[in-house]
Each structure stands twice: as structure tokens, then as C-alpha cells.
Image (cartoon, grey):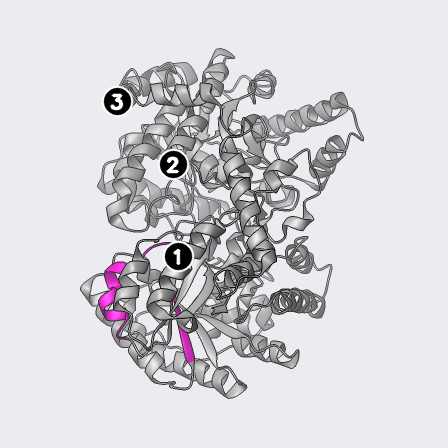
Amino acid sequence: MLTQNLGFPRIGAQRELKKACEAYWKGKISLPELEKTGKNERRKNRTFQHKTGIDLIPSNDFSFYDQVADMAFTLGVVPERFKPLQEKLNNMDLYFSMCRGYQKNGLDVTPLEMTKWFDTNYHFLVPEFEKNQTFALSGTKAIDEFTEALQEGIKTKPVLLGPVSFLKLGKEKKEQFNRLELIHALLPVYIELIGKLENAGAECIQIDEPCLVTDLSDYERNLYRMALTELFGSFPGIRFILTTYFESIEKEADWIVKLPLEVLHLDLVRGANQLDTFLEKAPSTLSLSLGLVNGRNIWKNDLEKSVQIIHKAKSKLGQERIILSPSCSLLHAPYDLNSEHDETGLPVVVKNRMAFARQKTEELITLKDLAGDAPSASALAHLQKEKKGREAWAQSDLVQNEAVKTQVAQMNKQWKAIKRDAPFPERIKKQQEKLQLPLFPTTMIGSLPQTTEVRRMRRRFAKQEITEKAYTDFIHESIASSIRWQNEIGIDVPVHGEFERNDMVEFFGEKLNGFAFTQNGWVQSYGSRGVKPPVIFGDISRKEPMTVAISKYTQSLTNKPVKGMLTGPVTILQWSFVRNDQPRQTTTAQIALAIRNEVLDLEKAGLSIIQIDEPALREGLPIQQDKREKYLEWAVDCFKLSYWGVKNETQIHTHMCYAEFNDIIQSIIDMDADVISIETSRSQMELLDVFAKTDYPNQIGPGVYDIHSPRIPAVNEMCDLLYAASRYIKAGKLWVNPDCGLKTRSWEEVRPSIENMVKAAKILRESIT
């Protein structure tokens, strides 16, 4: 038996890569210094895996920003608008301009679009293809990183995003055509790249084809068969590992097992049932990589269960045809549990049930020992300890709350009754009489820049270096300053800015029972942006009002209606590490009941507009069609539960970002939020097409300011976007807002951008009236 990793976290134990990238973008360090940081992180990852005993260690799993953008850059897929930069910038800066945009020296270039990586919270850059797209090997990153490891005495397994998934994850630009037809121009460049890797000494290459788990058409299936047969057949001396994750590929088994392929990886966390099919159909030349260690959660592996699965596979294949692996890349897991030292946020009893990327790597070695012919005494003792720990955990009062379980059980009898008292046309009329908003009302999504001073004061308060009063006074002044600015520029619905919040999920988790928190459990979301998901370990309930006092204070500063800002139940679930001992639907219902308590308290406190953000609702959509209906039903029900009981005069907003809405538009309508704000600026309002085709009945705020780029959009650019939006949606239904919250941007970027946004809204009002 062998062991392998499919990918390793690249941000570093203390987010070294994030800090280096941001320092480089600000001109504080040089390019060689940035590259040195990258090299150090790669070396640390390889060395750890090598010393731990991993047999197949990945290379080219590292990225300074995004692995899909890396592949696009390697294959010469650089959109035309970046060509003027090629003579001005070095390769790294050209690459970053594709990821972040460029606005210097009289040039203003928008970045590639960004969207979610399947059903994760990771965002990737979307390649852009033209009808006559040409491809050329324009980068040597994969070769360089393989050679770098080889020089250190470690022969790695290069990881490449496969050609069909690369095309499927992109989009057509300018002309309408089928981008998959580009496969015939693309394959020779892949073959050239793999040939160079073979010449450099590579003997094993991992080809990631995650789109294999999606619902394939006959055309796509035939294309896959042709492309992979040609690719694998061109290199009889290379051991290819075809890798899929996040779902089962059981439906494609008949043709996959006939490929000229030596190893097939199966995600047995998300698709446990597919193993039987492949054990039955795998030819004697095919080995299976068993993805048993969960690469997307932080709980320890059920060693006993995993060993049973391995023995089952051994009985069919023999141990020489088995590779033990995480279910997917460990990119989606935090780096090292040993970095956690604060027992106040992460109690020892909870920490003892957890495993981060390094610990999951060690679990592979333990599983190999346990599933061998003669398990060691230490491995057997470890197995018994973990079994007893799981049994005790299941009975723990820390985890189980019978009152909460009873409340959810009672809710299960009345889901159909959960809806607003009046239909939207009646509600919006009453809301407008109360709010008196103009045409194209302006607002922001919620957060404002989290400056160095804001973060410093939060740290000082957490360390008890300042009093609670001093911290509260600072937060109040930050809010007051932001409200003064919003009033001055003419924002119609101000926000308090969320200066007191560390993260839109972590903030609420800290005020709910059933959550724990890490110090360094960072996971990359996009580029240099990391998130630190809370840990849901037990039954959830609200301790006390969470946002009422600060919302009342903010409303006292202005006569305009201030938005109460909450995170929705599905997003809190999706953006946390979730307990794995009960259905996710049950956990979400618990969160929804807690949020409902807060919504009703905000309404009693006098707030007329309450936003319940659900940016992750689309993210949680199952990848395969036959599993979606059930998810959407309970996800929408839990969202509606979170505001159940509010008055018709109270306006409920929600927010979603970076997703395709075509396949869930009816569910978005069923959510029945009075106003939805969505990301549309990078797609030039294309995402609104589905809202127009379905005649979306409620109001909508299409984002006109791409907050994931440092660019400052001009007034005429925003006007153009709003004019484009008005072609899809009637003017009376349109709100004006950024794509997302502004916490990651600086005030130097935000002030002019939002002021331009307000000016654009006023221009549109005047043009229509």
C-alpha cells in the first residue's frame, strides 16, 4: 500500500504567503523576497510530508493566487485586454493583474471573473476563451517546482488541472461558441507540458478532472473519453493518477475503467457507495486511491471504519493496488492543529477530536499501519483510544442539548406554515410608505474597511489591554464617523460598518452556544484572503441578543433607515466546520431559530430594514442534479424560518455573491426576500439575464463595484452597468450597491468608489425622471 496527498495548504502555518503577497502589492518587499517566501513554504510542505512518510508527494499544488489562473497563464490563455501590460510588467505582475486587475499609468484593466470552486468557499479565477483561441506553453511553473523538489532529493508527483475541466471551468468571450471544441488545440500543449515533465524526471503525474463528477452530456462524456485516452496513451512511461473529488463518479464507471490509466482516485467521503462499483469493474491493471481522510473538515478520522473499508478493498485488489489518500486536496483544511494554544476559544475536549492538514497527513500513515498485515502495537492502541473518544463524545452534555433538539423537532411539524403574512406587492407598498426611498436607492452590503487601527483595538481588547468602555467608545466613534460620511455623500440606507466584527460568521458563532474557535485555523478563500471558520461541535442556541444594542446606537445617529446586519443560517453552516454526527439540515434549523430570535428583537428595537446574508446558499448546492431538490427545499425553509414572524412593514434583504443563479432561480424566488443584492460587476450584468427571464418579482441590487479588486470604478462605468441592468430589470425594482462587503478594501479605495456609486445613481434618477 502507498500513501499520497492530493494537495497541501499553501498559505503557511502563520499565513506567511498572505502577508508576503500583500506586502509585495504595497511595494514593501521585492519580487525576489516574495518568491523566496513561496519557495520556503513549498520546502516546508514537502519536507514535512517526506519525513512523515508520504509516498506520493504533490508538487505544483502551490500557487501565489489561484491554481486555475496558474494553468491559464501556463497555457498562454491571457485575454486581449492584458496584452498592453505584457511589455510593461514582469510575469508575476502580469499574472497578478489577471487576478486583481490593473489601474496605473493611465491603464485601467479589469481582472478575470471569480466564482466558487464547486461547492466550497474557495474562489477561482475563470479563464476566458475566444472562438479561435490559441494555446502555447507560456510558463514553466509545474516543471520548475518539480525540479526544485528534485534538487532537494524529493521526487514529487506534479499536479495538473486536466484539459477538459480547464475548458469547462472557463467561459466564452466575445462570440458564442462551444469552448469544449477547443480541446483539439489544447491537447497538444498539454502533451508538450507533460513531455517536458517526463524529461525532467517525473514518473507519476496527477491529473485533476473535478468536472467528471458533474452531470455529463453524451457529448461531454465522449469528449472526456477521447481527450484522456489520447493524453494517457501518449506517455506509456508515466503513471497517471486521474483525480476526482466532491462527489461520486459511479455513473461514469463503465468507460473510465477502460482508459489507459494506472490509478483512479475516489472521494469516499462524499461518494462512499462508488467503491463497490469500482471494486467490481476495475481491471487488473488499475489501482484505486481511496479518499478516506476528509480533506474538507477538521474532525479526526474514524479509523475503525476506514480500516474496514481498506480491508474490503484489499480483499478484491490486494494491497499493492491500493493508495491511501485524503478525499481531496488539503487546501480546504487548516494547516496545523499544534498551532492552537488558546483553551478559551478551543477547549481541550473539542481540540482532542480534531485534525488539521498535518494531522490528516499523519492519519494516512496510521491507517497504512493499521490496515497492514501486522499492525504495530502503538497503532492498535491509537485505534482503541480514538474509538473510546468518539463514544464519549456522542454522550457528552457539551455536545447534546435536549431542549434545542425538542424545539427543532416541533418545527418539523410546521414548515409549510412558515411564510410572510402578505404577498410581496402588498408588503413593498407598506414598506415604501414607511421608508420613503427614492428611485435607485443606494446602500452598501454591510461591512466597511477594517483598518489596521480597528484590528489593533480588537486585539488589545481581546488581550484585556484596554477596558470594555474604551473599546466600545472606539467602535461607537468609528460607526459615528462612517454615518457622518454616508449622510454627507447621500447614501439612502446606511450601514453601521461592522467594525466590531472579526468575521461575518465567526462574530455570530462567538455569541451562540455550540461553537468553538481556533486561533490559526485559517483556510484560503481567494488570493491572499483567508477565513477562519468556526467549529460547530454541539447543539446551537442564542445566548443573548447579538446585534441589537449596536444597531439601536447606529439608528440614533441618522434619520435614514439603517440596516440591521445578520448572517443567514445556511451561510453560517457552510462557512463553519460542521459537526458530522447529525444531518446538516438539523444543524441549519438550529441556527435559523437562533437568528430568528435576533431578527424579531431588531424589529422590536425599531429597525425597519434587516439584511440576512446568504452568500453561501448557492455554494451548498449539491453538484449532481438528483440531489439538489432536497437541499434547496430545506435551505430555503431555514432561511424563511430565520425571519418568520416579522411585520409586513419590515423589509428583509439578503445578499448572494459569485455564483451562477440559473439553476436555483425558483428557490431564490421562494426565499421571498424583499430585496436581494448580488455580484454582477465582473460579469457586466450578465448574471441578471436569468432574473429577467423569470420576471423576478421582488427587488434586486446588482453590484456595480467589484470589491475584490483594488480598482476604483469611474462614475460613467457604474452608469453603464446600471443602464445595462435596467435592460434586464425595471428601474423601480433596482437598488444600487457594491458587489459585496468592503472590509478587505482600504478607505482610500472605498471613499471615491462609493461616492462615484452615489453619483451614478443620481444620474440615472435624473435621466428617468
Q: Residue furthest right?
A: 465
* SS of the residue under disc 1: helix
Instruction: Give how far apart the Cα atoms at labels 1 and 3 are.
Output: 41 Å
Q: Amino acid at mark 1?
A: Ile
Is residue 257 located in the magenta-colored stretch of the structure?
yes
Label 1 vs 3, first from the N-terminus: 1
Q: Nearer the viewer, mark 1 or mark 3?
A: 1
Q: Position of residue 158 (x, y in %)?
A: 50, 74
Q: Quadrant of residue 582?
A: top left
Q: Which residue is mark 1?
A: 309
Q: Which residues, given as a range, are shown in magenta?
A: 239-258
Q: Which class describes the residues within 10 Å of circle 1: few (<14), some (14-19), or many (20+)?
A: some
The answer to whether residue 129 is visible is no
Sequence-first disc among 1 and 2:
1
Q: Is residue 60 left or right of residue 720?
A: right
> Residue at the bottom extreme?
199
